Image (cartoon, helix red, strand yellow):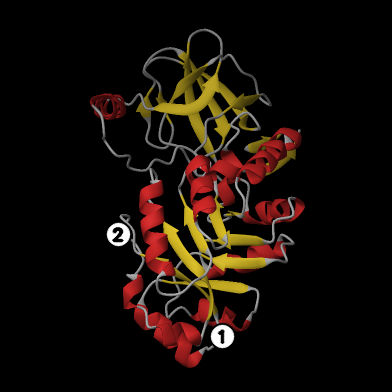
Amino acid sequence: MPLTLTIDRVRWEAHQRELIADVPGLVPVAKGNGYGFGLELLAEQSGRLGLPTLAVGVAQEVDRVRAGGFTGDVVVLNPWRPFDEVATAQLGDPSIIVTVSRVEDLVALASKHPGTRVLVEIKTAMHRHGLDPAQVDRSTLDALTLEGWTIHLPADGSLAAARSLALAGLAVRKGPVWVSHLSEADYRALHAELDVETHMRIGTRLWLGDRHAYRTTATVLDVHPISKGAPLGYHQVKAPKNGFILIISGGTAHGVAMAAPVPQRSLRQRGVTVLEGLLDAAGRTLSPFEVGGRKRSFAEPPHMHSSMIFVPGSAPLAQVGDEVPVTTRMTTVTTDEIRWA
């Protein structure tokens, strides 16, 4: 009675191979929850695609992609810090490439762990991690194995910004250039302009780019008729009208209905936020579960492994054992089962 992710392998992989052909030097990213597929599965798939390098978010994820069978080089995107014991213990692994974003960390690695394979992160408009290449002493790089300069652009990254930052790094030491968040066209232009090896890290577009290649469904576990005003759930809220309570697999333990702040860039986005707030206040929060062709309201906040959904009317529109569509945020969801279609 699980929350299930079904993948059309042929279609899913066809999209990936098309993108790989379009992006020379593509490096897949497998981090966090594995974009809803799991790190082990993405590691296995990266091997199937013949990709020699895989990027993970943090050092703690390396063992999981190895468990998935990936045997190539692994880039750890989270910058190395001297106090990260797991990342430091991995420095002896010749297949690990660490990211360095501070001059003092470059110096520490050169002094205590010479020969370490490093990507030096250049500071961008993200203002998250990174350094000014002009601050880097060439002699420090001489003691390390420079795998290149890495540039983490904002979501709407521009070719001009990538070019300028790449040239700043190459002025200090020639080496490969790694980027993220460029369009395919802009990346190919950068690839053609630079006389060094280039790579583009891609996660979302690679794994989630064809939204029709995968779907998430939830199982109806129980169906109960309920009368208007009858108390229900942990919090004994009252049913708004006659109808049915459906208990459906999928809750907070799966990451279902988990929300994150979004930028309010337009009047429409602000209006949607206000409307959602009013619905929440009225106890009519819309769930991601679709029953009878439309999304239904939560009867109360979702539970650990299941959710209570309210369906008004004289028919429940679903029976125990039915599978119903559920809209999931793939970067937060963890399903119970994966099926191949």
Q: Can residue 253 be seen in this view?
A: no
Query: Observer-nearest residue: 21 or 341?
Result: 21
Residue carrying label 1: 115
Q: Is residue 270 left or right of residue 48?
A: left
Residue occupying the far bottom of the picture: 111
Displayed quadrant of residue 208: top right
Give me the residue at 26% from left, 35% from top.
Answer: 264
Q: Which residue lies furthest to the top in this view?
A: 314
Q: Report helix, strand or loop for mark 2.
A: loop
| Residue drawn at 57 percent across, 31 percent down | 248
The residue at which mark 2 appears reads as 127
Q: Where is residue 167 in the image (x, y as percent from the top left)?
A: 40, 63
Q: Residues within 10 Å of mark 1 (few under 14, many from 20)?
A: some
Query: Where does residue 320 sit, x and y in percent of width and height?
Result: 66, 24
The kind of secondary structure element at disc 1 is loop
Q: Which residue is drawn at 71% across and 33% down?
A: 11
Residue 47 placement, left or right of 259: right
Q: What residue type is labelled 2?
A: His
- Of the numbered discs 1 and 2, the one sitting upstream in the chain is 1
| Quadrant in which the N terminus appears | top right
Quadrant of the image occupied by residue 83? bottom left
Residue 309 in the image, given as x and y percentages of width and height: 48, 26
User: In the picture shown, does residue 252 fall above or below 322?
Assistant: below
Q: How far apart are marks 1 and 2 (CA)?
A: 28 Å
Residue 307 is labelled as none
Q: Quadrant of residue 106?
A: bottom left
Q: Nearer the viewer, mark 1 or mark 2?
A: 1
Query: What amino acid type should be assigned to the residue bearing mark 1?
Result: Gly
User: What crowding class fits label 2: few (fewer than 14 Cα within 10 Å), some (14-19), or many (20 or more)?
Assistant: few
Where residue 249 sits: x, y (%)?
58, 35
Image height of 312 relative to 115, above or below: above
